[in-house]
Image: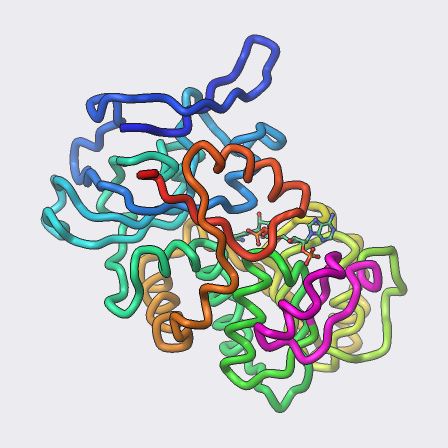
Amino acid sequence: MRAIYLTKSVDGKTEAVIKKLDPSDLPTFEQNGVTVDIDYSTINYKDGLAITGKSPVVRKFPMVPGIDFCGIVKSSLDARWKNGDKVILNGWGVGESHWGGLAQMACVSGDWLIKKPDSFTPLDCMSIGTAGYTAMLCVMALEKAGVTPQMGEILVTGASGGVGSFAVLLLSKLGYRITASTGKTSQHEYLKSLGAHEVITRESLSEPGKPMQKERWGGVVDSVGSHTLANACASTKYGGVVTACGLAQGMDLPLSVAPFILRGISLIGIDSVMANRAVREAAWKRLADALPTSAISSIVQVVNLENAINEGGRILRGEVRGRVVVDVNT
Ligand code: NDP
């Protein structure tokens, strides 16, 4: 089996190569290990961090990165899974603490797998991947907090990225009016084609701003953090809801309490990695119900394992539009 293989050099640098491994090299799980023949994996922002070593998301070396995969069960010690089952994995520390999906095979705990929705192909599933699943978690959190299309515009930041693209697409399918913020002037038409009604520049949100600004957003999906998230909160309408899932601009949050205590806004954190099985299954069911597969293709480019290493650097530089799917068998 071939895999992207990460090692750490003596001077602390992460090195990523394509390596031939023997399936017997895969870590084992005594209780409920499931070995999967992988069809597709993806490059998420976190995979970029792992492959380049820019941030210490990899907890031990050597590591096979890849926080997502879709494939077919080859063998299973877990009674819930059998040879031939079609499965998806997102998160659970795979690609960080456990060998991950940027390989032709993986062995993971059966607790971490969910069944592939019948209406999606393996390529669809990885086109969506952690980014699309996280976007759906944001949408579900907005709905649970009472945000409806009648509450007005929804702001999506980092809109041309993976989470952002799926947030725009999903919210538009659900009837919301979307304003997409992007740093890529070349992607305004792309965002409109996904369903954005208006596109604004990243700079209009990314600089330090006043603690209270003109009320505009009924809800927000933010994958950027830092001043962008602070400005989004400061311009959320009375009773509006902001979901925070990412840190593409930064991990800081230079925010005042004013929008919370004077406008009653809510800020909801979104985590896809350790979300329980019921939440995952609900999110993937909603994705299968909401997304026509024809709508997904414009978001995706497919690369092979060799090119995936390069894509890890590109995603951190904000150069990727939408999603990168990795065909691990080419
Ligand atoms: P992408 O790189 O695909 O998207 C991030 C987008 O953010 C970019 O496309 C760009 O969009 C924008 N961006 C990049 N750099 C900056 C910057 N310096 N300032 C402002 N905006 C910037 O990544 P993903 O969509 O895969 O992930 C987005 C974020 O969400 C990441 O931080 C990731 O770690 C996090 N994440 C969190 C999850 C969770 O469970 N909480 C799950 C998945 C992702 P544009 O050019 O359009 O402005």
Front in this rendered view, residue 263 or 329: 329
* Residue 325 placement (x, y as % from top left): 44, 49
Front in this rendered view, residue 144 or 52: 52
Here the colouring is rainbow
Q: Residue 102 occupies which quadrant of the picture?
A: top left
Residue at 59% in and 15% down:
12
The residue at the far right in this view is 210
Is 186 magenta? The answer is: yes
Q: Tell whether 48 sits left or right of 115.
A: right
Q: Tell whether 217 sits left or right of 80.
A: right
Front in this rendered view, residue 195 or 80: 195
The residue at the far bottom in this view is 150
Q: Tell whether 215 sits left or right of 318.
A: right
Q: Is residue 315 above or below residue 28?
A: below
* Residue 79 placement (x, y as % from top left): 10, 48
Q: Is residue 46 above or below residue 191?
A: above
Residue at 68% in and 81% down:
153
Is 181 magenta? The answer is: yes
* Residue 104 placement (x, y as % from top left): 29, 35
Residue at 69% in and 46% down:
251
Span of residues in magenta: 180-205
* Residue 203 placement (x, y as % from top left): 83, 59
